[in-house]
Amino acid sequence: MSLLEVTGATKRFGGLVAVNAVDLRVEAGGIVGLIGPNGAGKTTLFNLIAGAFAPDAGDVVFDGRSIAGLHAATICERGLARTFQIPQPFGSMTVLETITTAALLHGRHIGRAEQAARLAAERVGLQGREDVLTGSLTNAQKKRLEVGRALGTMPRLLLLDEVMAGLNAAEVSRMLDVIRRLRGEGVTVLLVEHNMEAVMAVTDRLVVLDSGRKIADGPPLEVVEDPQVIRAYLGEDDAAELEDSDAERP
Amino acid sequence: MRAHGYLATGRRDLPGLALTLLVAVALPLLVRDEYYANVLVLILIYAGLASSWNLIGGVAGQFSLGHSAFFGIGAYSSTILYNYLGVSPWLGLLVGGVISVALAALISFPVFRMRGVFFAMATLAVSETIRILVIYARKFVPLPYSISINYEPGFWRMIFEDRSSYALLAGCYFLVCAAVTFVLTRSYTGYYLRAIRDNEDAADASGIHIRRYKLLAFVVSAFLTAAGGTLMAQYILYIEPGTVFSMELSVDLPLMSILGGIGTVLGPFVGALILIPLRELLVEHLGGTLPGAHLVLYGLLLILIVILLPNGLLGGLARLGARLRGRRPAARPEVRKA
């Protein structure tokens, strides 16, 4: 059984069908990438899973139990943690206090939560920054703090929403190290990302959304060769041109 | 670094704890002068009330402007029970507290849907509604507009001959409010309430049930505010809707907290320590000659203090301390207000 199983998930905003009957499976231990052009419905699907809002149709099953329509906090308690695309720090807290807050989910003992938080801070490369106020962090550090806060809740599935957006090459490679290390520790990751290169580097499987529908699902190298995916990214004309030039090649 | 237990306490808490105990217990026993004892009683009751407000308004960041509802319910419950049924105000205090908790829980469903100024306005509307309902209720029940309590000293009647006894009672009240704040802020609930105050989305995503913890802070705050209402009624021995359900009180409590240091354990006390004597002095020196002038000066002073010390006096002191120790002050972001 998959750790996460989304079946027929649909979400409408007025007349717009943002997510249209999407199926998605995430097996335990893997890193799955969710990609698609702007407005494809990636973040909406992400929000349906994380509990920001309930699907209009379909179901989200995590670890054998439906979580569709549950509160985000309850979903987090079940072992599914998310980050935010735009970092959402606790403004009055330090790095350590932020992660400690998340770590208190599994026990009200502050000393133990702090110890867990130190480990999580180290896992995301924020060691030595524990006592810095979240407002004084750089954007890249704030992004890693998002991951650290999510890790603080000790999730079995980690949902990362564009954690690499807005980072420079060095910062991206640092974030990739963090994600690779998580794989080694047995954390399952679902990654929404724009940065193709970065996605190709870490994922075991890619799922592509376009206009609310799933158009591809498979190993990254196969998916990026898929004509439907190329068409979705480049548009009809450019894709046709590309196909023509391919055909002309001897 | 030392790991702490269920309460995050450190050596830096000790001076505050010592000061609190000193103020709450030693001062009431020492001050014998009638005039100063009166000011001390008022300071301590207001310090307790502002601490109660600070739980929901400062620690949890939900800026209530309706706390006079709980204060008034506390004052009315114990006074009516005592005057008409002979029930001890000690019991009346509990009854008023329970009614306030019920009211807080009831209104929490609609008001917690609102954030910021909308929450403030909703709580203001609730307290005004209660005041008007109490006045309106006199059409149906034989309740006089104002109620006096006969002056018959006795411990069970919660009426005392000397002001220092009142001061001691008020000191204990403040001590309880400060202790509750201390425990709530230093335990996991403190982390949770701060998280909710700072960023509700992130709190939600960290597994914190926001409604549950806001409600917790709200009902505890309501109970303690009602208790202060009973104490004040027993001290003044006179209540009427215009004074115990007054908007002035709803504004004074946040004002004291902001002035001293919002969200901190001792901030509300520091605020009361400044505002109450200031007001007494201004009324005394200007109230007779230039009616209303004391309010103008009071307002001006408040504006000045808030501009100069946006994080309250405790925040300003912390910054001064950091500067004296030759370190750059930690840029503690301002607590989001309203």
Image (cartoon, coloured by chain):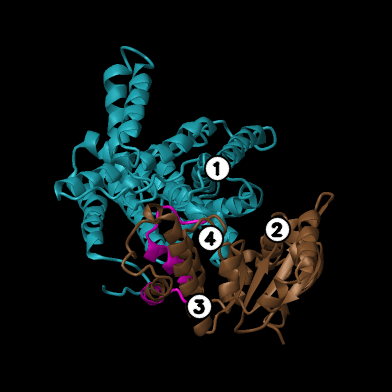
* B130 within the magenta span: no
The three-letter amino acid code for the residue at tag 3 is: Arg
The three-letter amino acid code for the residue at tag 4 is: Ala
Vertical relation: A85 (above or below) A160 = above
From the image, tell me which residue sits under label 3.
A180
Earlier residue among tags 1 and 4: 1
**Residue occupying image coordinates x 50% and y 71%:** A176
Tags 1 and 4 on a common chain? yes
Q: CA distance from mark 1 to mark 3?
A: 41 Å
- Element under disc 2: loop
* A102 within the magenta span: yes
Judging from the image, what is the letter of the chain drawn in brown?
Answer: A
Vertical relation: A183 (above or below) A50 = below
From the image, tell me which residue sits under label 4.
B203
- Element under disc 3: helix
Main secondary structure along the magenta-highlighted residues? helix
Seen as rendered, the residue at the extreme top is B289
The picture places residue B51, in percent across and down from the top left corner, at 39, 49
- Magenta stretch in the rendered image: A87-116
* Front one among A158 and B310: A158
The three-letter amino acid code for the residue at tag 2 is: Pro
Tags 4 and 3 on a common chain? no
**Residue occupying image coordinates x 33% and y 64%:** A129
In which quadrant of the rendered view does residue A191 lie? bottom right
From the image, tell me which residue sits under label 2.
A37
Q: Are marks 4 and 3 in contact (CB under 8 Å)?
A: no
Question: Which tint is chain B?
Answer: cyan
Mark 1 or 3, which is nearer the eye? 3
In which quadrant of the rendered view does residue A231 lie? bottom right
The picture places residue B302, in percent across and down from the top left corner, at 35, 29
Q: Is residue B138 left or right of residue B269?
A: right
